[in-house]
Image (spheres, rainbow, N blue to C red):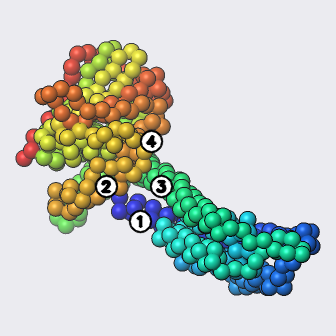
């Protein structure tokens, strides 16, 4: 999990780094708009603007753009400080242009919101707050000090200060609202992207482990022939040397045969991992197909060393279902069982059920149950009930990332299952209940048919009650 967290931190850092080319293109767009507005007001409307000073301010942005384009490649990514400085320059440049053209009486004063909005979507909140304060501070200065805006060719109009105050208030509220709103929307998108990335990392790890199982079986099959040849050669050497061999040679040959037998025994175990070992040649076996009761057993087995009682049982109507091995489902169910064991006071129960239409698993614990927030936002990323006070058995404090349930739910639902979370009801009952349910035809999809006796009633799984040592 530490590796996943480090990778997510790296992804988050890269996600917040904007490309310099984006800033340059947006600034060229702003320069084009500012130039068109000044030229249109001067020559189209006949307003007497300080034309030279205005274009000097606009030229400052052009020079900066050219310098950045020459100095850095288009793919260069800016860190948070550099991006904030460029946005601060844009705010100051806009304020200088507004100072020459009427201050807050100029309707284009609302463009103060643009740099703050860009910062809110891409930069940390503290940078956005600093840029927002800069914009508000310059807007306040422009409300008090500015050159008059020549509304007519032969005169000028000074708008009432109350109107200017209203514009200042609109900029203040607009900066605060759009900044917070844009940051919240962008942050939720980033968190969801990170959570999905974490899911993919976990699934890739489980698939890699499953591939290792296949490689082990392939290696066992390929090594069988050379080991058989070594066994035959060693027997021939023993036969040819006969009883006249020196004790050292006889001992070495005996050791060779012993080690070959040991290797063949190990390979035999690997190749017999198909469960029943019926040798039907269907290619399914342990690596692809698992019965429902074996699936439950695999979930319980890693919990044997924990100091909590785990009761496991399977019951159903008709033949026991089998499913194709799915690393994502195994990881998701294992994560849910881990959480149940962590929060349980004394006992966890896992019950498998099936009938002719559905297959489902219920995992219960006698802990405090799910909080209202978790039940309300079940399956959303970064929702956790863990706190710094909870610790591992070794005493190391852990803070939940809030991704475990999201990853588990995502992986399980990919298999076509439905997962529901609830709390036990009743005065004498308490704890959390997680129910994972499949339609039977979906659960058995892709599984190799296996011949197993029908199981009815309650069938406790052997050696599944774990009692603390």
Q: Earlier in the sequence, mark 2 or mark 4?
A: 2
The correct choice, above or below, for 414 with respect to 182 in the image is: above
Real-space CA distance between mark 1 and mark 3, rounded to the nearest whole angstrom: 15 Å
> Residue at coordinates 27% horizontally, 52% vertically from top-left?
386
Q: Earlier in the sequence, mark 3 or mark 2?
A: 3
Real-space CA distance between mark 4 and mark 3, rounded to the nearest whole angstrom: 15 Å
Q: What secondary structure is found at the residue carrying circle 1?
A: helix
Where's residue 406, x and y in %?
A: 40, 45
Can residue 254 be seen in this snapshot? no
Residue 410 numbered tag: 4
**How many residues crowd mark 3 within 10 Å: few (<14), some (14–19), many (20+)?**
some
> In this rendering, which labeled residue sits more in front, label 2 or label 4?
2
**How many residues crowd mark 4 within 10 Å: few (<14), some (14–19), many (20+)?**
many
Contact (Cβ within 8 Å) of mark 4 with mark 1: no
Q: How many marks?
A: 4
Residue 458 relative to residue 329: left or right: left
Residue 192 relative to residue 251: left or right: right
Where's residue 272, x and y in %?
A: 33, 38
Residue bearing mark 3: 191
Q: Earlier in the sequence, mark 2 or mark 1?
A: 1
Real-space CA distance between mark 2 and mark 4, rounded to the nearest whole angstrom: 18 Å
Q: Earlier in the sequence, mark 4 or mark 3?
A: 3
> In this rendering, which labeled residue sits more in front, label 2 or label 1?
2
> In this rendering, which labeled residue sits more in front, label 1 or label 3?
3
Can residue 359 be seen in this snapshot? yes
> Residue at coordinates 38% horizontally, 33% vertically from top-left?
419
Find residue 396 and report its image quarter: bottom left
């Amino acid at each position: 999990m530490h590796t996943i967290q480090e990778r997510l931190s790296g992804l988050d850092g890269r996600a917040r780094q904007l490309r310099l080319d984006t800033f340059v293109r947006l600034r060229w767009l702003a320069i084009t708009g500012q130039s068109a507005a000044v030229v249109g007001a001067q020559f189209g409307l006949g307003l007497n603007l300080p034309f030279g000073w205005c274009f000097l301010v606009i030229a400052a942005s052009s020079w900066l753009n050219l310098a950045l384009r020459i100095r850095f490649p288009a793919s260069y990514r800016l860190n948070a400080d550099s991006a904030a400085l460029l946005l601060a320059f844009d705010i100051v440049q806009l304020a200088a242009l507004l100072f020459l053209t009427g201050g807050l009486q100029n309707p284009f004063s609302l463009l103060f919101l643009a740099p703050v909005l860009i910062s809110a979507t891409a930069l940390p909140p503290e940078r956005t707050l600093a840029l927002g304060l800069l914009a508000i501070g310059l807007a306040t200065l422009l409300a008090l000090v500015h050159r008059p805006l020549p509304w007519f060719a032969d005169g000028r109009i000074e708008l009432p200060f109350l109107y200017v105050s209203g514009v200042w208030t609109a900029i203040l509220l607009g900066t605060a609202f759009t900044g917070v709103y844009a940051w919240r929307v962008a942050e939720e998108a980033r968190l969801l992207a990170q959570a999905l990335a974490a899911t993919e990392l976990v699934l890739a790890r489980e698939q890699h482990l499953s591939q290792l199982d296949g490689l082990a079986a392939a290696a066992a099959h390929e090594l069988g022939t050379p080991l058989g040849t070594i066994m035959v050669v060693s027997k021939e050497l023993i036969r040819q040397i006969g009883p006249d061999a020196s004790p050292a040679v006889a001992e070495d040959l005996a050791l060779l045969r012993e080690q070959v037998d040991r290797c063949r025994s190990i390979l035999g175990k690997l190749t017999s991992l198909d469960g029943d070992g019926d040798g039907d040649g269907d290619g399914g076996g342990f690596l692809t197909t698992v019965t429902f009761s074996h699936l439950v057993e695999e979930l319980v087995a890693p919990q044997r060393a924990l100091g909590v009682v785990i009761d496991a049982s399977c019951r159903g109507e008709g033949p026991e279902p089998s499913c194709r091995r799915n690393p994502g489902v195994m990881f998701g169910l294992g994560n849910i069982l881990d959480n149940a064991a962590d929060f349980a006071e004394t006992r966890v129960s896992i019950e498998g059920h099936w009938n002719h239409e559905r297959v489902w698993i219920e995992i219960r614990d006698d802990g405090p149950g799910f909080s209202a927030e978790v039940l309300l936002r079940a399956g959303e990323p970064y929702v956790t009930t863990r706190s710094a006070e909870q610790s591992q058995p070794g005493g190391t404090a852990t803070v939940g990332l809030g991704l475990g349930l999201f990853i588990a739910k995502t992986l399980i639902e990919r298999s076509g299952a439905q997962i529901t979370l609830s709390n036990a009801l009743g005065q004498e009952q308490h704890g959390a209940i997680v129910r994972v349910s499949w339609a039977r035809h979906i659960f058995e999809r892709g599984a190799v048919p296996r011949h197993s006796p029908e199981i009815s009633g309650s069938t406790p799984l052997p050696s599944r009650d774990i009692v603390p040592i």
